[in-house]
Structure formats: C-alpha cells, structure tokens
Image (tube, rainbow, N blue to C red):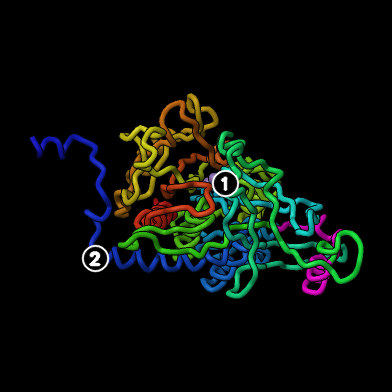
Amino acid sequence: MDEKKNELFYQPKNGYDVIDTAERLALEEYCRGYMAWLDDSRTEREAVSEAVKLAEQAGFVPVESLTGPLQPGQKVYHSNRGKSLLLAVGGKKPMTAGCVVTAAHIDSPRLDLKQNPLFEDTELGYFRTHYYGGVKKYQWTAIPLQLRGTVALTDGSTVEVVIGRDPGDPQFVVTDLLPHLAADQMQKTLAKGVEGEKLCLLIGSVPYAGEGNDRVKLALMSILHDRYGITEEDFISAELEAVPAFEVRELGLDRSLIGAYGQDDRVCAYAELAAIMELEEPERTAVCILADKEEIGSVGVSGMRSQAFERFLERLMGDGAALQQCLSNSFCVSADVTVAFDPMYPEVSEKQNAARLNYGVGLCKFTGSRGKSGASDASAELVAYMRRICAEAGVLWQMCELGKVDQGGGGTVAGFMADRDIDTIDAGVPVLSMHAPFEVTAKLDCYMTYKCMKAAYQAR
Ligand code: MN
Ligand code: MN
C-alpha cells in the first residue's frame, strides 16, 4: 500500500529531508549574500544601486552602450529613473522567439515623509508621514527607524540622506501610549487603534537659543541645513522614507530562518539577480525585472504597468518592429513572496493548499481574492511547464494559495505581464509576518527560489 501511495499521491516533503550536505552548504552561502545585500537595500533606490554594483562586477554594462541588437551572452542593464532595474543576458535564439522574464518588486511598505513634514508641538520636533503600501499601523510604533532617501534640489542636483544606519547614528521612533493610560485605545480595533495622522517621527527636543516660537523646529532645520545644505522648502521635492532599523539577522536556535525588513519582495528580487548574474549564454534571452510601486498597484513610470519595459526590449532588439512577436512568445515568472502557513494563525489558511516553510519555492497558479478576483491565473499548461523545469533542475517547490477561500487575498505584477500577452506564473518565497517591519523567511526557500529563477532562465 505504501508503494502505491508513493506512486499516486502528491506528498510534499520538508526540504531538509531531501537535500544533501553540499546543497545545505550552498544554501547557507547563498543566504549570506542575500542578507548582506538586503541590509544595504532598504529603499527601492538603494536596492537598484546595490544591484547595479553587483551586476557591474558580473560584467553587465548599461544598455545605452549597445550599438546593435543584443548578442548571445551579452549582458546589459537599464536603471529606470534609479527606482527600478531591468537586466538582460542575450540568448542563442533571436528575441522574436521570446524571452524568459522574471519580475520581482523592490518597493516595500514604509512611512514616507509628507511633502511638508516638519513641525513642532510642545517643544518636541516631528516629521509627518503618509504610509506607503499595506501596513498594520500599530506595528510601526515604538520601533527604531532609520531615515533614508533623496532630496532633489531646484538646481538639478540631489542630496542622498541616510540617517540611522551607521553605529552611533541617531535613529527615530513613532511613539505609542503607555498601557497605563491606554484604556480607551485598547477598546478600539487594531485598524483604528493607531491613526495614520499619528504616525509622526519624533526627531528632536532641544530649542534654538533665544526667544520666540518654533525654536525646536528651527534648531532641527539648522542641523539639516548644516549637514545637507537643505531648507524646509526642499522637502517638497524629496522622497524620504522612514524604514525599520532592525539588522538583518538569522533567526532560531538552528539559524534556519531570516528576519529582516523588506523581504517582500527583495527576497525574490535577489533570487532573480543572483540567478541572472550566473548566466553565460541561455537558450532564450533572459530578462530580470526589479520593479517599483507594486505595493500601491504597480502604477507610475517605475511601476510594472509602465511602457519602460517595452522600450527596454526594443533597445535589445535594435528596433521595435518585432516587439509584439517577442512578447507573445515570452514566458514570465512573477517572482513575489507568498503567505507561509503560520501555526499561530491556522484559521486564515487551508492547510492542504498552504505554503509551508522549508518546503521550497511556492508556485501560485492564481492569487486574487473572493473568487480569484484580480488574479492572473496561470494556465494549466504553464503550471505543468514549471513542474517540469523545477523537477529537471532539482528545485524543491510546493503549490500554494494565498489564504483560504474568502479570507482575503492579494495581487502581484503577474496580471500586468499577462496584459502584454506574456504567459505568466507566480512563484516566490513563503513569508511569515508579511508587511511587518520584521518579516520571516526560511533560508531553504530563499535558496530554492534562486534555483527556480535560474532554472527558468535556462529552460529550453
Ligand atoms: Mn510582494
Ligand atoms: Mn507586498
């Protein structure tokens, strides 16, 4: 009977019961690289610049230097306004035969400073924020925050701001009520307990010497002016992000997990990047996308709905004539994180179809919510194709859905790739505490996602 079960049943296995010592060492090494990259990539702009550094070391050159169509083995990249990144390695086949595309995103939930953020109340200085992406607001109080981003000046120059990264740097916090006086707050729902307008960063307390109003604000503004040469009006053309200051750390006695801010979706972005950097001459041209703005609907010039993707492909092809043929023959892995089954919250998942930590990269035929609404829904044929690719490359994978029926759901860039007539499937790393300031992944799944990306790029 056991033999018959083995033959006929789908029985996912814990990855640690499958991999050998060599693979275990390989996954540890891979995760060290991922953790180092992630620690320096806390904004979409930083993720791009850190990725460009790695890509240039691996021989990628700006796409602008192409003088004709992309040649087999040639490696190029294009930074789209410093916020999203496109990379490609030329394949043996012409691009009209289609590309293999992987698309992850590098924006993560955070607290953006408002355009007029600075104020003083009761001799304490603050920055007002407007949160970005889906956050549980109460999670963003009483944790150390860094401030990172860019101030654009009217003379065309920019000022990079990073405060709170280096040891000894000051950091910031959004305060919360003490439990002793929180009786009213505790009666509210989690959604209402902390209001968006109360998510203000505490940034200082010492007044400027002299008499009058706004002395703390003046003292803080003069610190910023001394350090960055900016005035209050310059905030209007700034993108400053308050991001969690937590170090990227191994978690657990056995160090099998990774705790960090921004793993959705930089964990898949790094998997794609690591995979494409190792390609020499794939069958089909490989394209790696690190997109911006996924968390707010993939909108904007740096989001996945932007035609910047088509313009990049046209550059690779030398002309736009055969672009549609290329798109129609392409295949895309929408590489985004998925929900890991959480034994503390089993009620939101249906166990038989939930992703589990250490079971490998999670393939999702569909995402969406309430009757698959908003899902791209990969075809059965495409899912079969992925099963074959993974099996041939020794990728441990699991089929999963994003929460039980009618519990909620989510979306990815998959639909926007499919809009372009590209066959697209979702695949990515299962995550615990997704969108929290400190998210959890399993090393084995991070590594298997990288292997999956590489296998996809190299598929025939
Ligand atoms: Mn995501
Ligand atoms: Mn997300």
Residue type at mark 1? His
Q: How many marks?
A: 2
| Callout 2 secondary element | helix
Q: Nearer the viewer, residue 128 or 405?
A: 128
Question: Which residue is found at the position 25% from the left and 55% from the top?
Answer: 16
Label 1 vs label 2: CA separation? Answer: 52 Å
Residue that mark 1 sits on: 180
Task: Answer left or right for 65 relative to 223.
Answer: left
| Callout 1 secondary element | helix
Q: Is residue 229 magenta?
A: yes
Q: Nearer the viewer, residue 145 or 321?
A: 145
Q: Is residue 1 magenta?
A: no
| Image height of 7 relative to 313, above or below | above
Q: Nearer the viewer, residue 405 or 343?
A: 343
Residue 292, given in percent of the width and then of the height, sits at 63, 51
Image quadrant containing the N terminus: top left
Image: magenta residue range: 219-240
Query: Hey, which residue is sitting farthest front in the picture?
Result: 180
Residue 304, given in percent of the width and then of the height, sits at 62, 45
Residue that mark 2 sits on: 21
Task: Answer left or right for 120 relative to 163.
Answer: right
